[in-house]
Amino acid sequence: MAQVDGPPASAAPGQPCVSKLVLLGSGSVGKSSLALRYVKQDFKTVLPTVGCAFFTKVVDVGASSLKLEIWDTAGQEKYHSVCHLYFRGANAALLVYDITQKGSFHRAQQWLAELEKEFAPGEVVVMLVGNKTDLGEEREVTVQEGKEFAESKGLLFMETSAKLGWQVCEAFAAVAHELLQRHKAGAGPTLPGGDAVDLNSGPARQVKCCAH
C-alpha cells in the first residue's frame, strides 16, 4: 500500500514548504475534475478514481512558495475503508459536494465528521466546496445552505465549476494562503472557531496559482 502519512509542512531553506491536501466527497461530485482543472488547466470526463490519485502543484503566495501534494480519494463506498487511511497526516482538505445532489452535501458533512475523529479542531485547513455551478438550473443545495453549514463548523466555503474553470484556482489558492499563514505562525490554528470565510464574493486574494 502507498505511504499514507503526509510530509511535514516544512522545507529546506530556499525550497517551498510542502503540505498534503486531500479531496473528500461522494463519487461523481467532480473531485478529480477539480484537481485536473487546477493542476493541468484541463477538463475532461474522467473515470471514477480507484483508491487514490496524486497530483502536485507549487503555488506562489507573495514571496513564499508552497508545494501542494493533492490526494484525490475515491468516492465510492467500496473504497471508503481504504480512503480513510489516505487523509491521515493531511494539512488541508477540500470537502466537495455536487450542488445538484443533496445527498452529496450530506455525505460531505459525514466526511467532516470522519476528519474530526482524526484531527483536533483547527489542526487542518478545511474548505467546503459546492461544485458544478454550471448546472445551476438543477441546483438542490442553495448557496446559503452551504454557507450556513460552513459557518457552523468554521470552514472556508466556495462554490466552483470544474467544467468552466470558475473559482477553481481561487479555492485552492485560498487554502494555500491559509496553509502558509499557519506555517508562518508556527502551525497554530488559522481560523477562529465558528467563523466561516465566504470566498464567493469580494476581491480575490493576490495569489499566483494558475500559471502553466
Image (cartoon, rainbow, N blue to C red):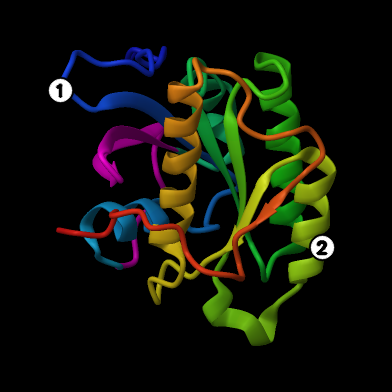
Q: Residue furthest bottom?
A: 137
**Quadrant of the image containing the C terminus:** bottom left
Mark positioned earlier in the residue sequence (2 or 1): 1
Name the kind of residue labelled 2 in the image.
Answer: Glu
Label pair 2/1, CB-CB below 8 angstroms:
no
Q: Secondary structure at mark 2?
A: helix
**Residue 100 falls inside the magenta stretch:** no
In the image, the segment drawn in magenta is 44-72
Task: Indicate the position of residue 122 as horizontal and vertical percent values.
Answer: 67, 24
Q: Could you tell me which residue is drawn at 48 percent across and 43 percent down? A: 175
Task: Indicate the position of residue 152 as horizontal and vertical percent values.
Answer: 85, 44
Residue density around tag 1, few if under 14, some if 14–19, many if 20 or more, within 10 Å: few
Q: Could you tell me which residue is drawn at 26 percent across and 44 percent down? A: 60
**Quadrant of the image containing the N terminus:** top left
The label nearer to you, 2 versus 1, is 1
Name the kind of residue labelled 1 in the image.
Answer: Gly
- Tell me: residue 98, above or below residue 14: below
Q: Is residue 71 left or right of residue 60?
A: right
Q: Could you tell me which residue is drawn at 30 percent across and 67 percent down? A: 43
- Tell me: residue 118, above or below residue 25: above
**Residue 132: quadrant of the picture:** bottom right
Tag of residue 14 = 1
Tell me the distance, in whole angstroms, between the alpha carbons under discs 2 and 1: 42 Å
Helix, strand or loop for the magenta stretch, by majority: strand
Which residue is nearer to you in this view: 191 or 141?
Answer: 191
Which residue is nearer to you in this view: 41 or 155?
Answer: 155
Tag of residue 145 = 2
- Tell me: residue 82, above or below residue 175: above
Which residue is nearer to you in this view: 100 or 181?
Answer: 181
Task: Indicate the position of residue 157 as horizontal and vertical percent values.
Answer: 64, 54
Q: Could you tell me which residue is drawn at 26 percent across and 59 percent down? A: 210
